[in-house]
């Protein structure tokens, strides 16, 4: 239990440091998330548009994906 | 009940009344947002220039929150495709005749035009379901399945992932795995690689044509994804994904062909079908792609709020062992108009380098390469998308939207794939397309 | 108040929104100045300094004391505004707490509302006793602020003082206010509630806690014995018509320890308990 928590802390610290290294990263407290919580700031905000577009680009271009999973294949590429 | 005697609710309400004096509200209404279905639906029209492909599709995504961060997502798509696609054969300065995939007849392309195969009218149905839930403090797990089916193609897939939060949700790491299995049953059977397009047998009965190796083939795809989402500040968010994809099995397009051309002139050679038979008047060979494709890609997306306007920029780099390298740069800017509607312009640029086995055509006197395809989607390619979306919220909290986009694609064969005098008159099946979408987002 | 305070006004009139914001801010500041334990010039500090002799309190403080007395009675002594001095008997050493028994023995006689003489408007504390309005003060400020806001206009208002909230009405388009409840312990995924009318209060271990057996536990003491409450949940959120009611029910639920859910079920209030 304790060793596990230490590892988690070290991992969190490492990630925290590396994210700081990304530069200009400020830590946002839970009560400061009013902008980040808006629907239009979510990564899946345009989910249906993106999924329809991805399907079109998948059948018309040579590369596909990269964003995430979900969505099937089709006989078009 | 003795239990009820211990209730302090009423006395507490009275005490509160005494403390606050007048104007103590009598009601309280607080609830979990769980129990609602959040449904996003869209109707889309896609149409290419010059009488090529047209597609109509209907999609809906329904999400239900079961509380405690447990979510179910279901989505379905129905689409119908009509029209003609380039077959891979090149234009000639004479009319060209080809056998249709079913073998039931032939079709002729006028001189100077890129041959298009118009025998497909297909309806596709796809269904996906996924579930996500927390499995421990800071860990969320998700599982998804997907199916899709059309006349000659079936897909089944499963995916699962794990995310972990750090730094009070300022950083999230995610990992996901997906496995898919696809089966193709081409009209007329699976062609033998580099076999010649046969003569028509006059029967449109879906039976196997000559030069086929069987009626169906399959492929497996394994995808692995690692992602980091990092909050950069109160107004911005960054997501970076690395993904690796391994496809193996039948990756060839069973309907695509290559023209065999004269090594000096670069013109397609002429063939005369046997007497009494109808068939191709040139030598056209079925394509052949490798049976494995390994691809890696790096994707980054930034979301930035500027006092209510949201800028989204995404970049993806992809490279694979077919030597197709691509860059995609995409941006959207959401501009609120008043408090209930917005306009969102969108711009996308895509560029790719040709596959190592891409050929514009094959020389009549040369030995066949191990793999070859004349599919323009595997050539050097650039594409632009420019469009905008307009959305309006109704009084009840639903949203109507309309999206119009223009797509322009230009492709080019690498110089070394040209034969004879072809460099003077290369014709690639470049096209423009329009995308028109109407959407309705509501809660049940 | 020790936490960020905000008010949301759903209105088309900027002037009204400004007026409401000013009124709410003024209310928060006034209560803070009057009842903060940490301010030298507050009414509360003055009362505590006068322990040993009778002190005359103003009308508003008298009503708060009446409410505190009611709460003490309704909770069989578990809720007691004189219990603050018990904190002197506990020290924290890197997250583990140590009870200093000699200090506890000295301090226990200074705890207990039964030892207070409350004859409106005269309050007499025994020497060494202290009162504080933790568990009532901030919630009272929320209810007061909301009342002020609704006096100024009919547009929907949501008052939020550090996680204790009250709403006068849903937003103009009919949708409820979406409230994020701060996660438990190591900031587990925060979850959302929809509030249309009334109040929400949350009591939890995110700020004052101890680590016991590798688990984070809230530091809650039973004023009757000075002992920590066993089996208290990580956090409790309660919905009630007023914030003082919600806040008190929250505190009482925590004091019930393992019986928190049973207590709240009996009271038939909407509640969310996080254990983990």
Image (spheres, coloured by chain):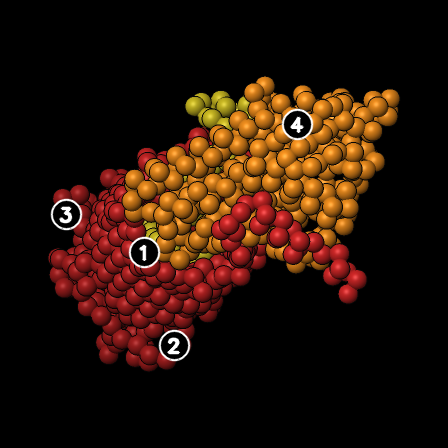
Chain colours: A yellow, B red, C orange
Residue tagged 2: B206
Q: Nearer the viewer, residue B116 or A34?
A: A34
**Is B410 displayed left or right of B141 in the figure?**
left
- Image quarter of the C terminus of chain B: bottom left
Closer to us: C197 or C66: C66
The answer to whether marks 1 and 2 sit on the same chain is yes
Residue topped by disc 4? C55
C92 is higher (above) or lower (below) than B373: above
Query: Tag 3, which chain?
Result: B
Which residue appears at 74% of the width and 46% of the height? Answer: C73
Q: How many marks?
A: 4
Q: Quadrant of residue C221?
A: top right
SS category of the residue bearing label 2: loop
User: Is there one chain holding both mark 4 and mark 1?
Assistant: no
Q: In the rendered view, does C259 fall on the left or right side of B414?
A: right
Q: CA distance from mark 3 to mark 1?
A: 52 Å
For the residues labelled 4 and 1, the Cα–Cα distance comes to: 59 Å
Q: Which residue is mark 3?
A: B425
User: Is disc 3 placed on a helix, strand or loop?
Assistant: loop
x 72%, y 48%: residue: C74
Q: Chain of mark 1?
A: B
Q: CA distance from mark 2 to mark 3?
A: 37 Å
Residue shown at the point (17%, 60%) measured from the top left: B50
Work out whether residue C207 or residue B154 is closer to the camera in this orientation and state it: C207
| Residue B223: % across, % down | 52, 47
**Where residue B86 appears, x then y in whole percent?**
26, 59
Percent from the top left, x then y, of residue A48?
A: 38, 55
Q: Residue at x 32, y 59 (%)?
A: B394
Decide if residue C108 is in sight here: yes
């Amino acid at each position: 239990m304790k060793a596990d928590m230490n590892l988690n802390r070290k991992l969190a610290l490492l990630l925290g440091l590396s994210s700081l290294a990304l530069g200009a990263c400020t830590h946002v407290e839970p009560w400061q998330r009013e902008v980040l919580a808006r629907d239009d700031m979510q990564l899946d905000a345009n989910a249906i548009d993106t999924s329809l577009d991805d399907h079109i680009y998948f059948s018309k271009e040579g590369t596909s994906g990269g964003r995430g999973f979900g969505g099937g294949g089709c006989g078009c590429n | 009940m003795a239990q009820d005697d211990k209730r302090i609710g009423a006395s507490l309400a009275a005490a509160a009344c005494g403390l606050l004096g007048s104007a103590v509200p009598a009601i309280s209404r607080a609830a979990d947002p769980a129990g609602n279905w959040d449904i996003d639906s869209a109707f889309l029209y896609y149409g290419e220039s010059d009488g090529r492909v047209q597609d109509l599709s209907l999609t809906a995504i329904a999400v239900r929150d079961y509380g405690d961060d447990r979510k179910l997502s279901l989505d379905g798509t129905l689409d119908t495709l009509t029209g003609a696609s380039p077959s891979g054969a090149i234009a000639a300065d004479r009319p060209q005749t080809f056998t249709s995939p079913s073998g039931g007849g032939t079709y002729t392309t006028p001189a100077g035009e890129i041959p298009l195969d118009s025998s497909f009218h297909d309806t596709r149905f796809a269904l996906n379901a996924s579930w996500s839930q927390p499995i421990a403090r800071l860990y969320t797990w998700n599982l998804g399945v997907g199916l899709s089916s059309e006349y000659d193609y079936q897909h089944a897939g499963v995916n699962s992932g794990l995310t972990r939060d750090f730094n009070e949700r300022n950083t999230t790491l995610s990992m996901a795995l997906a496995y898919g299995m696809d089966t193709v049953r081409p009209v007329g059977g699976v062609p033998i690689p580099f076999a010649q397009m046969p003569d028509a047998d006059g029967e449109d009965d879906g039976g196997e044509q000559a030069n086929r190796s069987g009626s169906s083939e399959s492929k497996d795809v394994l995808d692995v994804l690692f992602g980091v989402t990092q909050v950069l500040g109160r107004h911005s968010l960054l997501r970076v994904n690395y993904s690796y994809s391994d496809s193996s099995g039948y990756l060839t397009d069973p309907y695509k062909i290559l023209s065999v051309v004269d090594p000096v002139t670069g013109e397609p050679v002429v063939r005369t079908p046997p007497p009494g038979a109808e068939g191709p008047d040139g030598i056209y060979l079925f394509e052949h792609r490798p049976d494995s494709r390994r691809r890696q890609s790096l994707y980054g997306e930034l979301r930035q709020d500027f006092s209510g306007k949201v800028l989204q920029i995404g970049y993806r780099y992809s490279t694979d062992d077919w030597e197709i390298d691509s860059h995609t740069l995409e941006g959207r800017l959401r501009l609120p108009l008043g408090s209930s509607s917005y306009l969102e312009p969108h711009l996308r640029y895509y560029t790719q380098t040709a596959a190592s086995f891409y050929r514009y055509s094959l020389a009549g006197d040369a030995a066949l390469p191990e793999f070859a395809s004349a599919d323009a989607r595997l050539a050097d390619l650039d594409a632009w998308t420019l469009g905008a979306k307009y959305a309006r919220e109704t009084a009840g909290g639903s949203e109507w939207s309309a999206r119009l986009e223009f797509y322009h694609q230009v492709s080019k064969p690498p110089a070394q794939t040209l034969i004879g005098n072809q460099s003077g008159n290369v014709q690639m099946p470049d096209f423009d397309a329009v995308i028109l979408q109407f959407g309705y987002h509501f809660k049940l | 108040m020790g936490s960020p305070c905000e008010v949301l006004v759903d209105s088309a009139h900027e002037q009204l929104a400004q007026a409401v914001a000013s009124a709410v801010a003024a209310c928060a500041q006034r209560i803070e100045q009057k009842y903060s334990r940490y301010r030298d010039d507050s009414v509360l500090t003055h009362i505590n300094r006068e322990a040993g002799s009778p002190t005359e309190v103003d009308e508003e403080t008298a009503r708060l004391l009446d409410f505190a007395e009611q709460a003490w009675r309704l909770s069989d002594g578990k809720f007691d505004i004189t219990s603050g001095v018990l904190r002197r008997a506990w020290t924290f050493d890197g997250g583990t707490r140590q009870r200093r028994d000699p200090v506890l023995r000295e301090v226990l006689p200074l705890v207990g509302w039964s030892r207070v003489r409350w004859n409106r408007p005269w309050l007499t504390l025994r020497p060494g006793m202290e009162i504080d309005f933790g568990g009532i003060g901030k919630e009272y400020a929320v209810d007061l602020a909301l009342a002020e806001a609704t006096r100024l206009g009919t547009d929907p208002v949501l008052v939020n003082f550090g996680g204790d909230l009250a709403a006068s009405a849903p937003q103009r388009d009919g949708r409820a206010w979406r409230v994020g409840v701060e996660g438990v312990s190591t900031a587990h995924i925060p979850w959302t509630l929809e509030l249309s009318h009334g109040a929400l209060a949350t009591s939890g271990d995110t700020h004052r806690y101890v680590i016991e057996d590798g688990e984070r536990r809230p530091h809650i003491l039973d004023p009757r014995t000075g002992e920590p409450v066993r089996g208290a949940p990580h956090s409790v959120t309660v919905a009630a018509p007023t914030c003082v009611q919600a806040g008190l029910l929250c505190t009482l639920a925590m004091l019930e320890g393992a019986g928190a859910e049973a207590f709240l079920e009996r009271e038939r209030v909407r509640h969310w308990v996080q254990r983990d």
